[in-house]
């Protein structure tokens, strides 16, 4: 009986609301497509070798399930503040989702030392991002509603899993601004590359040379695997290919 009522309610809601257009196909971006094909570790190594910079997030930033994606950053900042203004104080972070381009990566920063104790993204936001065609989300904070995220297979990297809410604890502070996400500077339209090794941020202005170097490093490493399998010597492999 309960299941029947739920189905009828869903049907009534669907007929009551105007149909929403499906997310438009993402315009082809050769740079983004290329970064989807390289490993995060190769990109991280490329940036360190080229510029001596660490542009990857910490080991705390983990996904709920195996995933790999890349896309331009849409950034959101919320600041810790106890108040009674409800969800209206966070309207800007919702607007950022509804206006994000297909293929974007939602990068959300919860400011504050205890940010891992609050869920910045949950089932409602993730379902919206999934249906709007976003590639994924990165949350400097926590995530919740994990059964729904697993069900829809929307990839979210976060520092924790917690049942809490940001409502009445945080206030929207800006969107599409430069933020510090888990120790890494992220500007709007920077390229976020994520896989099971973690998350790296590629400054858009340097993307071409970083991609070129990452491809070179990856080709060398993958060429070493069959050599090692045949000769069973890491010393000989490093001497031949010149990298570790």
Image (spheres, rainbow, N blue to C red):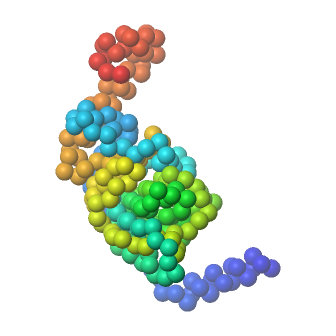
- The one of 9 and 147 positioned closer to us in this rendering: 147
Relative image position of residue 100 (x, y in whole percent): 35, 68
| Residue 139 shows in the view | no
Q: Seen from this angle, which residue lies furthest bottom?
A: 16
Q: Give above or below for 168 relative to 235.
A: below
**Which quadrant would residue 96 be assigned to in this image?**
bottom left
- The one of 55 and 205 positioned closer to us in this rendering: 55
- The one of 158 and 38 positioned closer to us in this rendering: 158
Is residue 58 rendered to the left or right of residue 26? right
Quadrant containing the N terminus in the rendered view: bottom right
Q: Give above or below for 79 relative to 20.
A: above
Quadrant containing the C terminus in the rendered view: top left
Residue at x 23% of width, y 52% of height? 204
Relative image position of residue 192 (x, y in whole percent): 35, 51
Relative image position of residue 133 (x, y in whole percent): 42, 64
**Which quadrant would residue 132 be assigned to in this image?**
bottom left
Is residue 218 rendered to the left or right of residue 86? left
Residue at x 59% of width, y 65% of height? 164
């Amino acid at each position: 009986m309960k299941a029947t009522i739920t189905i009828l309610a869903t049907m009534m809601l669907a007929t009551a609301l105007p149909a929403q257009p499906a997310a438009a196909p993402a315009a082809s971006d050769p740079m983004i497509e290329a970064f989807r094909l390289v490993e995060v570790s190769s990109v991280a190594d490329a940036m360190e070798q080229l510029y001596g910079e660490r542009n990857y997030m910490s080991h705390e930033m983990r996904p709920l399930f195996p995933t790999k994606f890349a896309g331009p950053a849409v950034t959101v900042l919320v600041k810790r503040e106890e108040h009674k203004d409800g969800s209206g104080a966070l309207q800007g972070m919702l607007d950022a989702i509804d206006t994000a381009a297909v293929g974007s990566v939602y990068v959300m920063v919860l400011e504050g030392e205890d940010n891992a104790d609050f869920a910045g993204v949950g089932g409602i936001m993730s379902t919206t991002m999934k249906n709007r065609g976003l590639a994924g989300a990165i949350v400097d904070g926590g995530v919740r509603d994990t059964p729904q995220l697993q069900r829809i297979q929307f990839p979210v990297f976060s520092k924790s899993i917690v049942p809490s809410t940001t409502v009445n604890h945080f206030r929207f502070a800006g969107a599409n601004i430069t933020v510090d996400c888990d120790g890494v500077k992220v500007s709007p339209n920077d390229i976020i590359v994520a896989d099971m090794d973690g998350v790296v941020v590629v400054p858009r202005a340097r993307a071409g040379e970083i991609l070129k170097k990452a491809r070179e490093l990856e080709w060398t490493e993958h060429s070493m695997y069959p050599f090692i399998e045949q000769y069973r010597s890491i010393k000989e492999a490093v001497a031949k290919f010149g990298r570790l």
